[in-house]
Image: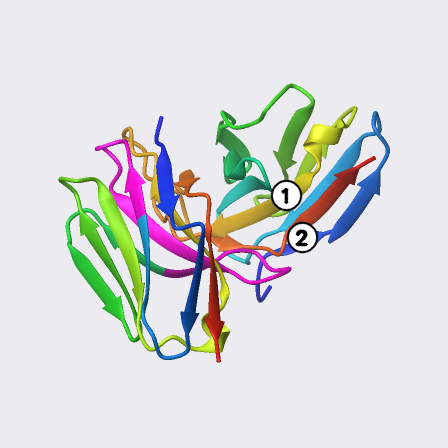
Amino acid sequence: GENVEQHPSTLSVQEGDSAVIKCTYSDSASNYFPWYKQELGKGPQLIIDIRSNVGEKKDQRIAVTLNKTAKHFSLHITETQPEDSAVYFCAANNAGGTSYGKLTFGQGTILTVHP
Amino acid sequence: GAGVSQSPSNKVTEKGKDVELRCDPISGHTALYWYRQSLGQGLEFLIYFQGNSAPDKSGLPSDRFSAERTGGSVSTLTIQRTQQEDSAVYLCASSWGPTNEKLFFGSGTQLSVL
């Protein structure tokens, strides 16, 4: 099955700096890669996603890039703000001919943005 | 509803007891998922429902775990004879349909087995 590795496990930045979180996946058949943000006491919230037919997607201060050949994808947050502090998870679908929301998640990155 | 609702938010039980966790998905969402979040294992898929049927139960860790969904809406995850290793946050998510992978998660049920 799919295996997703995520780095770093913790990331500390100053407000206004950029933050980058990287993930690798193992199954070349995976074709959907979402990123979730989880705040304390809440469930994960989808913040951006990308499909394998595009290399980059941007939504205001966040962007995701995908390198299918290398089987890795990254989350980029620019102009970080204290409210960006949370745990971020990458994920990949388990394609194998299916397209429903069965996802394999990375281990998470604790992002702390210092004012 | 406005979002995925789960109850209870916290559950403390004794080893060997049975527990039931409830999920009320977003109105109109036909697909429903259970995931488990634990410190050692991260977020793990447990089961997927489309309507009332469960075409994928591959993530259920043992036969002590079962789930059902009635009326294409509310789902219940049941854990029988709970063990300490069952302690985790159980998350429910829903989506618009079988081909929609955008999941909306509830806040979860924190299960503690003493």
Q: List x then y, in percent, for residue B6.
A: 67, 52
Q: List x then y, in percent, for residue A39.
A: 56, 63
The answer to whether residue A103 is left or right of residue B90 is: left
The answer to whether residue B29 is left or right of residue A13 is: right
Tell me which label, 2 or 1, sits earlier in the chain: 2
Q: Magenta segment: does it hold A63?
A: no
Q: Residue at x 51, y 40 (%)?
A: B51
Stretch in magenta: A23-47
Q: Residue at x 69, y 29 (%)?
A: B85
SS class, disc 1: strand
What label sits on residue B90 in the rendered view? Answer: 1
Give the answer, above or below, for where A32 lies relative to B1: above
SS class, disc 2: strand
**Disc 2 marks which residue?**
B6
Chain of the residue under label 1: B
Packing grade of label 2 (10 A; few <14, some 14-19, many >=20) is: many
Query: Label 1 is placed on what type of residue?
Result: Tyr
Chain of the residue under label 2: B
Q: List x then y, in percent, for residue B93.
A: 53, 49
Query: Label 2 is placed on what type of residue?
Result: Gln
Q: Residue at x 63, y 34 (%)?
A: B68
- Residue A48 visible in the displayed image: yes
Packing grade of label 1 (10 A; few <14, some 14-19, many >=20) is: many
Residue at the farthest top position: B63
Q: Residue at x 41, y 69 (%)?
A: A13
Do the numbered discs 2 and 1 sit on residues whose CB atoms are within 8 Å? yes
In the picture, the quarter occupied by the C terminus of chain B is top right
In the picture, the quarter occupied by the N terminus of chain B is bottom right
